[in-house]
């Protein structure tokens, strides 16, 4: 094998740098480059992602009635039926630092702020915010150097870093999941077009910016700029790698097409105050962002991501599923059957979007399994029953195989309340990063593996 081929990580073109998917021809270099693989003996790199859903759940329709394997999926989890063997539901996790603990109101702000930090956020609506370093950024500090992007932060909400959003808490707590330091949240990207550019542009500077402007002016695909390099690479690949590369380039082209459609639709409604590139339909927006996450993992552009579907306290409505009401408004249900039914529909909607993400990952072969087998994906939120603003018995799914180090296909009901940060410590272990503690952890959650 040519040394140049074994080191191939990107396709290059004018102002464009496209990471390659995992190919057999580049596997020797990838194996040497991956610290986590060296520590765990795996060829494929391990990825970790966190997906946040807002405003709690209708817990009667979320929590499975049976424990262990062969459990019956609850109504809220039914959209995940075809993937039941690829995840575990965990009941009994809590975030004590999302409780008031003397700070009064603000459960939605604390739910978001503590979800990945396990820290009690300072109650302030000013500039003197203070939280904790989030678990994704702990991982990025050690593993981010192995990929083009240390981490990827996405959301379907517009980023906010100032203002009073919840009972005296800064908006920075509710609209950011990732915290690089105690005082520095990482604003997520809402616009899929900008997220796409971040993944596939060659960087920033006069030459790169001019190339992007040229692409847009002539309505050219990013693939047009790397086509010559792609053809040269294909001539050196075996049949399996050629097929993988073709599938990858096709998926990139498809996302570009959908981004173009969203931009055209926005331009057709000039009076509608929506940024170009963001789909009008919420489900389309979510799925496009999930597709970008899949591409980021597939190409090893990053191994760490967070996706804030919506902030806690979100008043988004869901007319497509027969819920024109504001989500946060009906979450204070007071046991009203009509409101509980609407919450259940929203819960099913979000589960269906998560199922879409997992299916995309599962459909991509990697090593002896799939890309999903080499992922650890935490899906859930910082509130269970929204009417009571509970922060225990949180709705949590742990999906993916963790490179063979996670159990799947079961409902794990913990015997006693367990800090969510215990789970995070155990996930870090599987990344090859061993910390004595994190947030408010009291130990490790060994039961996940």
Image (cartoon, helix red, strand yellow):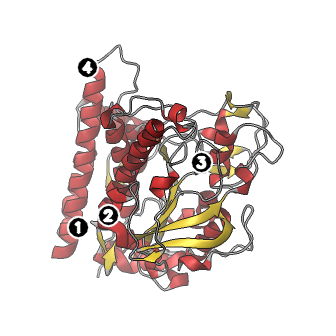
Question: Which quarter of the rendering shows the N terminus?
Answer: bottom left
3 or 4: tag closer to the N-terminus: 3
Where does residue 22 sit, x and y in percent of width and height? 33, 70
Q: Which residue is mark 2?
A: 81
Of tags 4 and 1, which is closer to the observer? 4
Query: Crowdedness of circle 1 by 10 Å Cα count: few (<14), some, many (20+)?
Result: some
- Which sits earlier in the primary sequence, circle 4 or circle 1? 1
Going from the N terminus, do you reach mark 4 or mark 2 first? 2
Q: Secondary structure at mark 4?
A: helix
Question: Foreground residue, 102 or 298?
Answer: 102
Q: Do residues under tags 1 and 3 come within 8 Å of each other at their CB atoms?
A: no
Q: Is residue 419 something that shows in the picture?
A: yes
Per the image, label 3 sits on a secondary structure element best described as loop
Left or right of 354 on screen, residue 116: right
Sequence-wise, the earlier of marks 1 and 2 is 2
Mark 4 surroundings: few (<14), some (14-19) or many (≥20) residues within 10 A: few
Q: Dot 2, crowdedness within 10 Å: few (<14), some or many (≥20)?
A: some
User: How far apart are the alpha carbons under marks 3 and 4?
Assistant: 33 Å
Q: CA distance from mark 1 to mark 2?
A: 28 Å
Task: Say if 230 sits above or below 22 in the image.
Answer: above
x then y, percent, for residue 308: 51, 46
Q: Which residue is mark 4?
A: 268
Count of residue discs:
4
Residue, disc 1: 244
Position of 347 with respect to 426 (left or right) is left
User: Which mark lies nearer to you, 1 or 3?
Assistant: 3
Residue 8 appears in the picture as rendered = no
Residue topped by disc 3: 177
Helix, strand or loop at mark 2: helix
Instruction: Determine which of the numbered discs, if any, sits on residue 405 in the image.
Output: none
Cβ atoms under marks 4 and 1 closer than 8 Å:
no
């Amino acid at each position: 094998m040519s040394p140049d081929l074994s080191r191939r990580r990107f396709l290059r073109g004018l102002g464009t740098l496209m990471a390659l998917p995992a190919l057999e021809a580049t596997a020797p270099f990838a194996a040497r480059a991956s610290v986590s693989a060296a520590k765990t003996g795996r060829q494929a790199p391990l990825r970790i992602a966190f997906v946040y859903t807002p405003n709690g759940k209708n817990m009667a329709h979320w929590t499975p009635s049976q424990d262990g394997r062969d459990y019956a999926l609850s109504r809220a989890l039914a959209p995940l039926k075809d993937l039941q063997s690829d995840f575990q539901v965990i009941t009994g996790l809590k975030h004590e630092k999302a409780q008031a603990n003397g700070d009064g109101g603000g459960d939605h702000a604390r739910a978001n702020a503590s979800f990945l930090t396990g820290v009690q956020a300072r109650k302030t609506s000013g500039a003197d915010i203070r939280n904790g370093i989030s678990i994704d950024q702990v991982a990025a500090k050690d593993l981010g150097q192995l990929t083009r992007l240390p981490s990827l932060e996405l959301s379907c909400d517009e980023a906010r870093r100032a203002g009073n959003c919840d009972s005296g808490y800064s908006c920075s707590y509710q609209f950011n999941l990732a915290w690089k330091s105690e005082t520095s949240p990482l604003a997520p990207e809402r616009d899929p077009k900008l997220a796409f550019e971040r993944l596939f542009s060659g960087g920033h500077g006069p030459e790169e910016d001019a190339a992007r402007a040229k692409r847009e002016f002539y309505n050219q695909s990013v693939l047009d700029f790397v086509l010559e390099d792609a053809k040269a690479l294909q001539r050196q690949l075996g049949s399996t790698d050629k097929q993988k590369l073709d599938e990858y380039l096709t998926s990139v082209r498809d996302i570009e097409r959908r981004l173009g459609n969203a931009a055209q639709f926005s331009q057709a409604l000039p009076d509608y105050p929506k940024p170009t590139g963001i789909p009008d339909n919420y489900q389309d927006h979510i799925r496009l962002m999930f597709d970008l996450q899949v591409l980021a993992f597939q190409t090893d552009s990053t191994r760490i991501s967070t996706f804030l579907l919506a902030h806690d306290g979100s008043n988004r409505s869901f007319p497509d599923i027969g819920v024109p009401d504001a989500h946060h408004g009906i979450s204070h249900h007071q046991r009203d059957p009509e409101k509980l039914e609407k919450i259940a529909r929203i819960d099913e909607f979000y589960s269906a979007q998560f199922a879409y993400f997992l299916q995309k990952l599962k459909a991509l072969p990697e090593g002896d399994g799939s890309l999903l087998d080499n992922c650890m994906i935490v899906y859930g939120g910082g509130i269970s029953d929204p009417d009571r603003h509970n922060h225990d018995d949180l709705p949590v799914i742990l999906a993916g195989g963790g490179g063979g180090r996670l159990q799947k296909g079961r409902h794990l009901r913990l015997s006693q309340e367990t800090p969510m940060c215990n789970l995070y410590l155990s996930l870090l272990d599987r990344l090859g990063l061993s910390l004595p503690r994190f947030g408010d952890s009291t130990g490790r959650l060994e039961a996940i593996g």
